[in-house]
Image (cartoon, coloured by chain):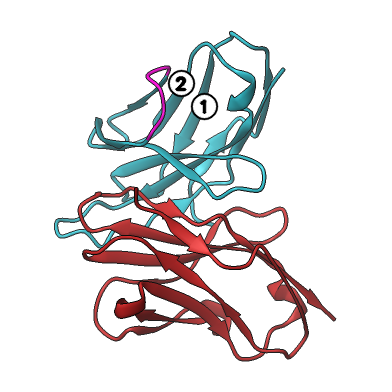
Amino acid sequence: ETGVTQSPTHLIKTRGQQVTLRCSSQSGHNTVSWYQQALGQGPQFIFQYYREEENGRGNFPPRFSGLQFPNYSSELNVNALELDDSALYLCASSLNLAGGHETQYFGPGTRLLVL
Amino acid sequence: AQSVSQHNHHVILSEAASLELGCNYSYGGTVNLFWYVQYPGQHLQLLLKYFSGDPLVKGIKGFEAEFIKSKFSFNLRKPSVQWSDTAEYFCAVIPGNQGGKLIFGQGTELSVKP
């Protein structure tokens, strides 16, 4: 176990709705990254949060947004859900050190189904 | 665009066979390299990582990987697989200028027959 937790584990929404996914990072970590993993694919980077600021973003539209809180936990929000948003959403926590060499540890994921 | 390519989608081996999973990336600068494993019903776990130094790195459960800079490769190896190695294996890269953005390959599913 990595100490990274995510909630909920499963979620069913309908097209057009909004969803919030939550992640608690491993103790001592200050950075959270979010990934989308479609069936049969590798995870795709959505964005990363470091000290409550967005610290890099992948090729995802603005309806994907996030937050990081002072305790380093994080939320991923998706507005105007589309069928293609159905996927496993992974959160990873890490300790951001000067000079890089960052190792990300993953949570169990939230499986989102959009109908 | 930067990408990671894993050569095999599905590999089937018998127990005690040797394993090599290929991984190539497309980025010319400094990279941090990782192999993650996802056992059935479990979350992604780190197998091993390379940041710098000795290009042959050892990970958990007898796995190792070799970074060959000239070939942009980071192949995963294990001399003798066990049934419990059945899982999906992902190669991932953080390009030197991309902060924490992990770029994953599409994964290789390994099935080990007892």
- Looking at the rendering, the stretch of residues picked out in magenta corresponds to A59-63
Asked if residue B113 lies left or right of residue B42, the reply is right
Q: Amino acid at mark 2?
A: Asn
**Is label 2 in a helix, a strand or a loop?**
strand
Which tag, 2 or 1, sits closer to the chain's start? 1
As for residue A61 lying within the magenta part, the answer is yes
Write down the residue under mark 2. Answer: A77
Q: Most extreme residue toward the top, as rendered?
A: A16
Identify which residue is drawn at 25% across, 31% down. A52
Identify which residue is drawn at 66% across, 55% down. B42
The answer to whether residue B28 is above or below residue A39 is below
Q: Circle 1 marks a residue in which chain?
A: A
Chain in cyan colour: A
Identify which residue is drawn at 30% across, 79% down. B70
Asked if residue B70 lies left or right of residue A104, the reply is left
Along the line of sight, the residue nearer the viewer: A89 or A39:
A39
Question: Which label is found at residue A21?
Answer: 1
Chain in red colour: B
The answer to whether residue B16 is above or below residue A109 is below
Quadrant of the rendering where the C terminus of chain A is positioned: top right
Q: Amino acid at mark 1?
A: Leu
The answer to whether residue B51 is above or below residue B18 is above
